[in-house]
Amino acid sequence: MPKRPDYISWDEYFMGVALLSAMRSKDPSTQVGACIVSPEKRIVGVGYNGFPSGCNDDDLPWEREGAFLETKYPFVCHAELNAILNSSGNLKGSSLYVALFPCNECAKAIIQAGIVEIVYLSDKYADTDAVKASKRMFGQAQVRLRQITPSGKRLVIELKV
Ligand SMILES: Nc1ccn([C@H]2C[C@H](O)[C@@H](COP(=O)(O)O)O2)c(=O)n1
Ligand SMILES: [Zn+2]
């Protein structure tokens, strides 16, 4: 019997894991997931945006606007940082799949961890200083940037066999 022809590609698989991880996020406006992949194509870390462990999801604010301390921004841990912190072992030479282009704070951690490639879907915050700084650092550190064109393909997961 020939092999099944309609299996998903590596990019679809790893971005799919990143998008599935994003579904764990409690952020009401933007859910981001990240998946770190070793040079041997093993998943070595996953994460999504959320408040740090032990911090109450219901006590901290999810607002986007208002006084800084009344918004989510000082408290939320980004998907990329969580994926690095959740990872097991050495990330040198690995690739990071993430739905949304990394900010400058995550870029520092990504570079220091030895990640050499960012594969992303959206760059919707490209005009922000955070993303401009991030791209400047990635350029200097020779981190490869690869945007996947959304194919619109639907990866359906049914919780049954
Ligand atoms: N690369 C990124 C960018 C953003 N996030 C997180 C941080 C927030 O929880 C949310 C963005 O919220 P918005 O300003 O769009 O309401 O996404 C991340 O994890 N990774
Ligand atoms: Zn970030």
Image (cartoon, grey):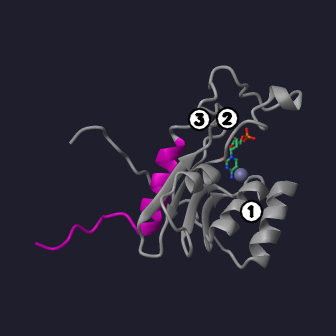
Determine the secondary structure under disc 2: loop
Quadrant showing the C terminus? top left
Answer above or below: position of 59 versus 85: above
Question: Bounds of the magenta span?
Answer: 1-22
- The earlier-in-sequence mark between 2 and 3 is 2
Q: Which mark is residue 108?
A: 1
Q: Give the number of the mark in front: 3 or 1.
A: 3
At a point 64% along the width and 52% down the height, the residue shown is 81
Ligand 2 within 8 Å, label 1 CB:
no
**Hey, which quadrant is residue 8 in on the image?**
bottom left
Ligand 1 within 8 Å, label 2 CB:
yes
Residue density around tag 1, few if under 14, some if 14–19, many if 20 or more, within 10 Å: some
Q: Where residue 132 appears, x then y in whole percent?
A: 84, 62
Q: Where residue 85 appears, x then y in whole percent?
A: 58, 52
Q: Which residue is mark 2?
A: 29
> The disc labelled 2 sits on which kind of residue?
Ser
Q: Which mark is residue 53?
A: 3
**Mark 3–mark 1 distance (CA, rounded to whole Å):** 22 Å
| Nearer to me, 38 or 155 | 38
- The earlier-in-sequence mark between 1 and 2 is 2
